Image (spheres, rainbow, N blue to C red):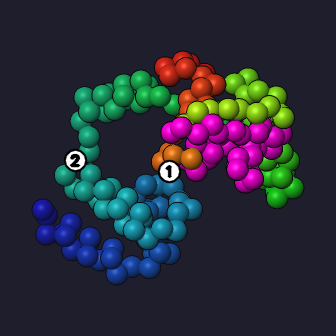
């Protein structure tokens, strides 16, 4: 490693975030809004090393571009942060969507399953399931309460076959 480069790295660790942001702007030719000190040091150190020892070869740049083109990219934007009122509406929509799951029988239906010599009964409710006097949010939660381990509630109550696509 070049002695001057080592000296510059040591100097970066002593600088404040404001100084690092200014140094970033000098090296990259554009300001940054980043305030993470560690990230700024890593980016500046990378740039200093690239300037001192040479940047990526043209072949490496082309390969990186190929990989980026072939990468699975996110096709939908992330959910925006909404106010609490909107969150309540979204959770109500989620409950409604769950109630319309085609794998579920209509509310009021009793699901029966023989398990370890007992006949278990679960009542389907519009907002969950009732088993043994307790309310559960999902069939998987009911199955876990019964078996003591996590399992798919639809499979446990035989609403779908193993290997079936949903």
Q: Name the quadrant of the N terminus.
A: bottom left
Drawn side of residue 41 relative to residue 102, left or right: left
> Which residue is nearer to you in this view: 23 or 99?
99
Secondary structure at badge 1 equals loop
Q: Residue at x 59, y 26 (%)?
A: 158
Q: Residue at x 47, y 55 (%)?
A: 29
Tell me where residue 24 sits by quadrant: bottom left
Is 120 magenta? The answer is: yes
Observer-side mark, 2 or 1, equals 1
The magenta span reads: 116-145
Tell me where residue 140 sits by quadrant: top right
Give the alpha-carbon distance from disc 2 to disc 1, as whole Å: 59 Å
The residue under label 1 is 148
Q: Position of residue 147 (x, y in %)?
A: 51, 46
Crowd around label 2: few <14 · some 14–19 · many ≥20 (10 Å): few
Drawn side of residue 134 relative to residue 40, left or right: right
> Which residue is nearer to you in this view: 78 or 88?
88
Q: Position of residue 55 (x, y in %)?
A: 26, 45
The residue under label 2 is 54
């Amino acid at each position: 490693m070049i002695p001057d480069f080592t000296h510059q790295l040591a100097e970066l660790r002593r600088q404040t975030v404001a100084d690092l942001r200014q140094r970033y702007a000098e090296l990259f030719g554009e300001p940054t809004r980043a305030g993470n000190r560690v990230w700024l040091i890593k980016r500046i150190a990378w740039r200093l090393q690239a300037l001192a020892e040479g940047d990526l070869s043209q072949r490496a740049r082309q390969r990186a571009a190929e990989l980026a083109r072939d990468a699975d990219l996110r096709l939908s934007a992330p959910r925006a942060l909404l106010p609490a009122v909107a969150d309540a509406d979204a959770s109500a929509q989620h409950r409604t969507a769950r109630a319309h799951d085609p794998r579920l029988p209509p509310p009021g239906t009793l699901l029966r399953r023989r398990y370890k010599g007992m006949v278990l009964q679960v009542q389907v409710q519009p907002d969950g399931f009732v088993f043994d006097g307790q309310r559960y949010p999902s069939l998987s939660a009911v199955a876990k309460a019964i078996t003591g381990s996590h399992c798919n509630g639809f499979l446990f109550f035989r609403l779908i076959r193993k290997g079936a696509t949903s």
